[in-house]
Image: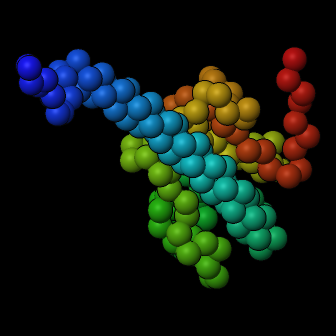
Amino acid sequence: MKKQHRSYGFTLIELLVVIALLGFMSVLGLSMFQGSQKRARDNRRKTDLVQLTKALEMYANDYGYPASTGGKIIGCTGTPPTACEWGSAWVRGVTYMQRLPKDPVSGNSYCYELGGLGKWYKLYAKLEGTDDPDYNAGLSCTGLTTYTYILLSPNITPTPKP
C-alpha cells in the first residue's frame, strides 16, 4: 500500500496569478484616485473664483472694479493702490478677503483681467481635467499664460458656444 503524498500550500503559478491580480487592482485604484484628486482641485479652483467674484463686487461698490496688471488685482493698501499677491490678504481700508485664493498646484496662478473701460472683468484658472464640461483650451489672460477656465463678471452676457 502506497502512501499518498499530500501537498499543502500554493503552487508557483497560483502565487504569480494572485500577485498579478493585486498589481492590476492597485494600478487601477491609483489611477482612479489620481483622477478624483484632479476633479477635487478643479472644483476648488471654480469655488475660489466664485468667492473672488463676491469680493470683487464688494470692492466695486466702494471703489469701482480694480485695475489689473500682469493678471493681478491692483487694489491693496497703498496710495496709489498696489498689486495684491495671490495667497495674501486683500485689504484696502477694509478687508475684502482674508486671503486671496491661490491655485492648489504650485507654479500655477489665477489671472484677473479688467476690460470694457473698467465696466467688467474676467477671472481665469488652469483646470487639470480635460473632461470637465467647463474646460476651454486656449484662453489667454492679458496675453500671458494659456488658461482653460474662465469666469465672467456678473454684468457680462456670455456668447454661446458654436
Name the residue at the front extreme.
Answer: 1
Camera sees residue 81: no
Indicate the quadrant containing the N terminus: top left, top right, bottom left or bottom right. Answer: top left
In terms of image quadrants, where is residue 137? top right
Where is residue 74 shown, x and y percent of the image?
59, 59
In-front residue for pair 124/48: 48
In terms of image quadrants, where is residue 24? top left
Give the left or right position of residue 104, taking residue 135 as reference: left
Where is residue 49 shown, x and y percent of the image?
66, 54
Q: Residue at x 80, y 50 (%)?
A: 153
Where is residue 51 shown, x and y percent of the image?
69, 62
Above-or-below relation of 100 to 147: below
Give the left or right position of residue 158, taking residue 25 as reference: right
Indicate the quadrant containing the C terminus: top left, top right, bottom left or bottom right. Answer: top right
Q: State the count of labels.
A: 0
Above-or-below relation of 99 to 41: below
Give the left or right position of residue 160, taking residue 141 as reference: right
Name the residue at the left extreme.
Answer: 2
Q: Residue at x 19, y 23 (%)?
A: 11
> What sort of colour scheme is used for the picture?
rainbow
In-front residue for pair 95/138: 138
Where is residue 73 shown, x and y percent of the image?
59, 56
Camera sees residue 35: yes
Name the residue at the bottom extreme.
Answer: 94
Q: Residue at x 91, y 40 (%)?
A: 157
Q: Residue at x 64, y 82 (%)?
A: 94
Above-or-below relation of 110 to 48: above
